């Protein structure tokens, strides 16, 4: 896909469509901010942009290869920011990796997924001309992080609904295979989500420590607010992981108890059947000298003993709660 180039003059987006070889010169002009969005990483195109904007080869390599850890790195004249945007649909969580080169006069975003995950960010920039004119790439970096964190809250709400449903299925209804599969999927999503959220605390810590100069001090209160939100999201994910584990343990306990009940019932019926079987086997040996064989009522006596023993065992096991 072709790169999406947006040129902002005094914070307002213009309609111009400059060629790629003019972007660096355009970004050096006063009151001009350039945003280059690459829907998919292309090594040749990134090489051209790296040569124009002086991007470090290691930063370009990280942007080209997906599955980087969320992080922030400082280079001369720009920052590299790797974040994951959460795309949450009912019952499904996906994370979109975005690598961003942030300077005061330009921003280059590299995405590794289809669709426009930055649509909300574009709308925000269009309505924040004054902030973009004053802070440039610093405001863009904050707006990107704010959009990422807002998406995390939506994903957390969806996960919470899924976990509540799982608790009902696993603990109260003991819905077998389907409930277990959903529980394992939810736990996988929580672990996957935590890997994206946990490093974000260090990213925001770097911004708050003033280890860089791209994001201005005026935005520190907003960055601190983002840090508080990230901590809350991380705590919610820890709680979700514990809830899923507790639900699975409760489900296994219920299944184990039910299995024990079945074993007790089977054992009780086996004992009830075993005693008459022993009596029948004794009288079925057909020895010549057995007193009961010549007795007129011997047959009925044997049947009576079988029924009495079986009935006695049934009453005993019933009283013990095995049946």
Image: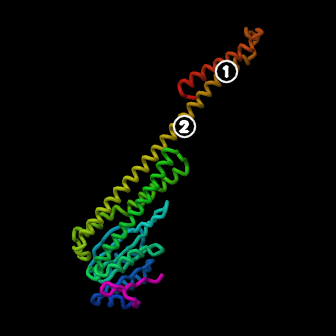
Q: Residue at x 35, y 66 (%)?
A: 149
* Number of marks in picture: 2
Q: Which mark is residue 276?
A: 1
**On screen, residue 45 above or below 269:** below
Tell me residue 247's x, y (percent).
Answer: 45, 47
| Magenta segment boundaries in residue numbering | 1-18
User: Dot 2 corresponds to which residue?
Assistant: 259
Q: Residue at x 31, y 81 (%)?
A: 129
Locate residue 103 relative to residue 158 in the image: left or right: left
Colour style of the rendered protein structure: rainbow
| 118 and 302: which is toward the camera | 118
User: Quarter of the image holding residue 8?
Assistant: bottom left
Element on which disc 2 rests = helix
Q: Residues within 10 Å of mark 2 (few under 14, many from 20)?
A: few
- Can residue 64 be spotted in the picture? no
**On screen, residue 65 above or below 31:** above
- Tell me which label, 1 or 2, sits earlier in the chain: 2
Tell me residue 210's x, y (percent).
Answer: 22, 71
Quadrant of the rendering where the C terminus is positioned: top right
Locate residue 150 relative to residue 323 in the image: left or right: left
Element on which disc 1 rests = helix
Query: Circles 1 and 2: CB distance less than 8 Å?
Result: no
Q: Residue at x 42, y 73 (%)?
A: 65
């Amino acid at each position: 896909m072709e790169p999406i180039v947006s040129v902002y003059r005094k914070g307002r987006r213009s309609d111009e469509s400059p060629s790629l070889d003019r972007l660096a010169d355009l970004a050096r002009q006063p009151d001009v901010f350039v945003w280059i969005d690459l829907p998919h990483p292309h090594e040749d195109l990134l090489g051209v942009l790296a040569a124009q904007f002086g991007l470090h080869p290691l930063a370009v390599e990280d942007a080209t290869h997906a599955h980087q850890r969320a992080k922030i790195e400082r280079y001369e004249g720009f920052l590299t920011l790797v974040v994951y945007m959460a795309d949450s649909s009912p019952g499904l969580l996906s994370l979109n990796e975005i690598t961003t080169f942030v300077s005061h006069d330009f921003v280059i975003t590299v995405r590794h997924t289809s669709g426009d995950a930055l649509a909300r960010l574009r709308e925000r920039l269009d309505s924040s001309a004054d902030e973009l004119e004053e802070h440039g790439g610093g405001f863009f970096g904050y707006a990107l992080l704010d959009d990422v964190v807002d998406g995390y809250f939506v994903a957390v709400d969806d996960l919470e609904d899924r976990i509540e449903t799982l608790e009902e299925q696993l603990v109260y209804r003991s819905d077998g295979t389907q409930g277990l599969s959903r529980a394992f999927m939810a736990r996988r999503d929580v672990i996957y989500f935590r890997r994206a959220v946990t490093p974000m605390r260090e990213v925001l810590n770097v911004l708050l420590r003033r280890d860089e100069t791209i994001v201005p001090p005026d935005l520190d209160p907003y960055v601190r607010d983002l840090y508080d939100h990230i901590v809350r999201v991380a705590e919610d994910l820890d709680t979700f992981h514990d809830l899923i584990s507790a639900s699975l343990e409760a489900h296994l306990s219920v299944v184990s108890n039910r299995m024990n009940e079945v074993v007790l019932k089977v054992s009780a019926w086996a004992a009830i059947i075993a005693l008459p079987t022993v009596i029948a086997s004794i009288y079925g040996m057909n020895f010549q000298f057995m007193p009961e064989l010549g007795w007129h009522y011997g047959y009925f006596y044997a049947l009576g003993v079988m029924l009495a023993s079986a009935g006695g065992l049934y009453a005993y096991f019933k009283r013990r709660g095995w049946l």
